[in-house]
Every structure is written in C-alpha cells, then in structure tokens.
Amino acid sequence: MADIKEINQIGWYLDNSYANLPETFFSKVKPTPVSSPRLVVLNEPLAEALGFSSKELKKEESTAVFGGNKLPEGTVPIAQAYAGHQFGHFTMLGDGRVILLGEQIAPSGERFDIQLKGSGRTPYSRGGDGRAALGPMLREYIISEAMQGLGIPTTRSLAVVTTGEEVMRETPLIGAILTRVAKSHIRVATFQYAAAGGTVHELKALADYTIKRHYKELEGCENLYLSFLKAVVERQASLIAKWMLVGFIHGVMNTDNMTISGETIDYGPCAFMDIYDPAAVFSSIDRQGRYAYSNQPTMGAWNLARFAETLLPLLHDDENEAVRLAQEAVSEFSQLYHNSWLSGMREKLGIFNEELQDKALVEDLLNMMYKYKADYTNTFLALSYDKPEDVSMWNTDEFNYWLVSWKDRLSRQAQAKDVCWELMRKSNPSVIPRNHRVEEAISAAENGDFSVMHKLLKVLTCPFSYSTEHAEYASLPPKTNKRYRTFCGT
C-alpha cells in the first residue's frame, strides 16, 4: 500500500491508488477555495467508522478541508473522467464539480473514496460553475443515510459545509459542499470512457484495478473478465430489487450513475413513493418516464448491456464469441433480479418457504394497492402488525379474499405466526424519507434551523423500529392537486 500517511490526531490515513491508473482517466485539479466555510452537518458515526476523530473534525482545520481551502498532507486531488448515456444519448462526461481527495483506509482495512462535491470547476465542467447549493447537498445527505438505515448499498455523506458564498441558479442560493464517501466512484460510464477513446491496454488496466478493489474473490477465474461482468450483473440485480422493495425511485439511471461496486449513487431527482403507482416518476427532467419506478429493472439491464459492450475486447479474441458471452451474461440479469425481488417480497409478507403461487399472491396485492391508491409503505406496515383494518382497501371483497389467501399461505409453513410477524417487521420499514418531510427539513435548514433535519435523521437511521415518534413520520402528506417534482442537484 503505497504513499499512505497518517495525518495527526484527526485520523486521515490516505492512499491515492486511483491516481496510479493511466492519466487518461483523470485530471489533477485542486478545489477552489471559498470565502468562509462553516460546518453545518457532521456524520459522527460514519466519521468514527472511517477512523476519524469526530471532535477533531468539528474544528476549524477540518472545516477548511471540507470547504476545499486546505488539503490533508499526501492528498493527490483529481477529477475523474467518464463518458456515458444520459437519457439514452451518449456524451463525454466527467467530474464537473467533484474532486476526489483520495482513499481513506478505515480501521477495518477497507478503502473508501473521499470526495468534495461542489468544490469548484474542473476540466469536465462544460460551462458549469462547479458549485452546489445547500438544499441539494442536504437532500443527498438525508436520502443516503436513509438508504444506509434501510440496508441498501449506498454512497454516504460525511459532512456538509456552507461556503459563505451564493450560487446563482434561477435565484441566488446558499453555497455548500458535501463530503461524499464511497467504496469507489468507478462507474459503467468510466468503462465507456475507456472503450470510447482509450486503448485496450488502458481498458485492461481499469478492469484489473476494479477487480482488485471490488472483486478480489474472482482472481484466478478461468475467464476473469467474464466472471467480472457476471458479478457486476448480480450486484446490480440485487441492488435494484432492494430499491423496488422499499418504493425507491432513483430518477436518473444514466450509465454515469451506475457504480461498478453496486452502491447507489447520485441523489438528485430521487424520491420514495407514497401511493403505489408503477408509473410513478418525480424527476422534472424525465418527461417520458424513462426511469419511472416500474422501468428501473429494464433500465438496469440496459445499462449493463452498455457495460458489457465495453468489455468485449477482454472477453474473447474472437469478436463474435465475445458478443455471445456478453449477451449470455447480461441475459442473466432478469432472473437474478426476479429471484431477489420475489425473495424480498416473501419476507415482506412473512413467508419463509417457496410456493409457485407466491408471485401471483404478491401481484394481486400490488394490483389492489394501485386500484385503491394505497400507500405502499403503510400497507405492508399494517400487515406486519396484523392490522388489516388500517389498509385503505379494507372491507372490499377483493382485499378480504386476498387476506384469506395470504393467511392460508402462512399456515402452510412450519413457522408460528409470531415468527412470521417478526420477519415482516424486520423487512418492512415503519418510516421512509417521505418527500414532504425531506422538503420540510431542507427548508428549515436553509433558514438556519437544522433541528428538523436532525430529528428526521434520528428516525431514518432506525427505520424498522416502531414508536410514537416513528408513527409521526409515517403519516401521509396533506392532499394536494400539485404533483411533487424533484430536480437534479445543480
């Protein structure tokens, strides 16, 4: 492990292995200093897990680092290059407002990227100012921590600082920088960049680095790169199934937002469903519903096909054979996704074993939820606590018939009913980051009150608990004719 330096009592323990790749994959660039950085949120549990002293991170010296005004010793700051499909259209991309400080080596020995998001212009800014506003940075902090609480692989947020400067969008906004933590920021689009303009040698260097970093267990496989492709397909199938099981809608599943590590990344136009609707889409820029809730598995497979295309030179010397191998690997996604989703749905309904009619049982429930405009999260929550009378379609003939079928299904397994309820309560969150609650927290914070956000985060970090406090956050927003819209975090 080269060039690792422990930086005083704060706990920095950095490496810069990505910067050892061919320079085509990045540009060396320093953050642009800001006038007066001020720490407004610090993720203390994450800080401690990464080996930092939370006490030291609250001091002025660390705030200067989070604001981009100072770099830890040994840092090699870079912006990563990538290219990819945005809403189906290929374009050259890169970190336009993000700078990677390096890789923190945690006490566990794991390696985590430390990024500053909103830290100024880079060679990939394409006319942007490289800055970020407070609202979108807090949104990413809240949602990423909610995903962590739900047990869904995700990038995380270590800190948010305000910059003392305004950023100009449609109106002047409070400037901010988010410190993001990830297993890595290597994307499908990173491989697309290598395939589009690099050499096979550079592509192989990227693949070998990624395998060593994220898929060490594959080393020694007969066809290493085919095994790599299959492993990425498997991780993404599992990840997207987890999204679907909690009603999460990513909103912008472009290839630059699909990580090779299998973590969820980019929380700009994302949202969680309240009322169950397969066609639900919240992103203001997704006018055709390309990334609607029910389309997410299809788009995941589409992105993986683009990834497979980049690996063709490594899969086999014969192009036709390489294409065949790639197609077979990607075709496995559908069944892997379905198995993971159905397994998760069984758990949400307290089912331990497998029967052929389980899929129909689940789909019948979902169809009723759509027909009667039932809340997705609260329907499963009511069933988990054996309170079917709290379900919006209670007392309809359809639901009563389904309820009998479901209870008959539970009786055909060895586990007692209380064991079934326990499984359901571990699988169905009592709270999610409801859109109106997230907006409420952000609005208060923008006006200087962070207590609303901290209260929300407290329940989101233990979403499978059930208390009076949790019940407050399980309530639906006031009815309105106005459709909720989310926006990219520009």
Image (cartoon, helix red, strand yellow):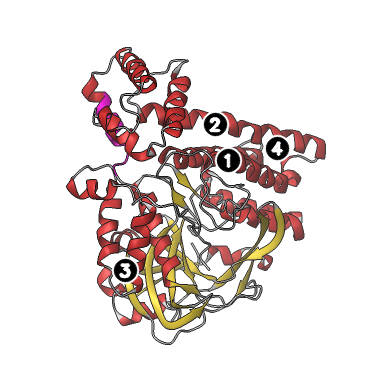
| Disc 3 + disc 4, Cβ < 8 Å | no
Labels 1 & 2 near each other (Cβ < 8 A): no
Judged left or right of residue 230, residue 409 is left
Query: Few, some or many C-alpha atoms within 10 Å of disc 4 (few <14, some 14-19, many ≥20)?
Result: many
Give left or right: position of 482 versus 123. left
Residue type of the residue flagged with mark 1: Asn
Which region of the structure is painted magenta?
420-430
Does the magenta segment cover residue 40?
no
Label disc, if present, on residue 444 of the rendered structure: 3
> In front of the other: label 1 or label 2?
1
SS for dot 4: helix
- Residue furthest bottom as drawn: 35
Question: In the rendering, which numbered label is found on residue 336?
Answer: 2
Q: CA distance from mark 1 to mark 4?
A: 22 Å
Image-based side of 113 in relation to 333, left or right: left
User: Residue 120 location, x and y as percent?
Assistant: 54, 78
Q: Is residue 428 magenta?
A: yes
Q: Amino acid at mark 4?
A: Ala
Circle 4 sits on which residue?
A: 326
Q: CA distance from mark 3 to mark 2?
A: 42 Å
Give the residue at mark 1: 295
Label 2's element? helix
Is the C-beta separation of discs 2 and 4 under 8 Å? no
Q: Say which of 127 and 77 sits in front.
A: 127
Estimate how packed mark 1 is, as few (under 14), some (14 to 19) or many (20 or more) residues with alpha carbons within 10 Å: some
Q: Residue 467 placed where, x, y %? A: 18, 45
Q: Residue 193 placed where, x, y %?
A: 69, 58
The answer to whether any part of residue 9 appears in the image is: no
Q: State the separation of the CA atoms marked 3 and 4.
A: 49 Å
Instruction: Examine the rendered structure and indicate whether residue 79 appears above or below residue 395.
Output: below
Disc 1 to disc 2, C-alpha distance: 16 Å
The mark tally for this picture is: 4
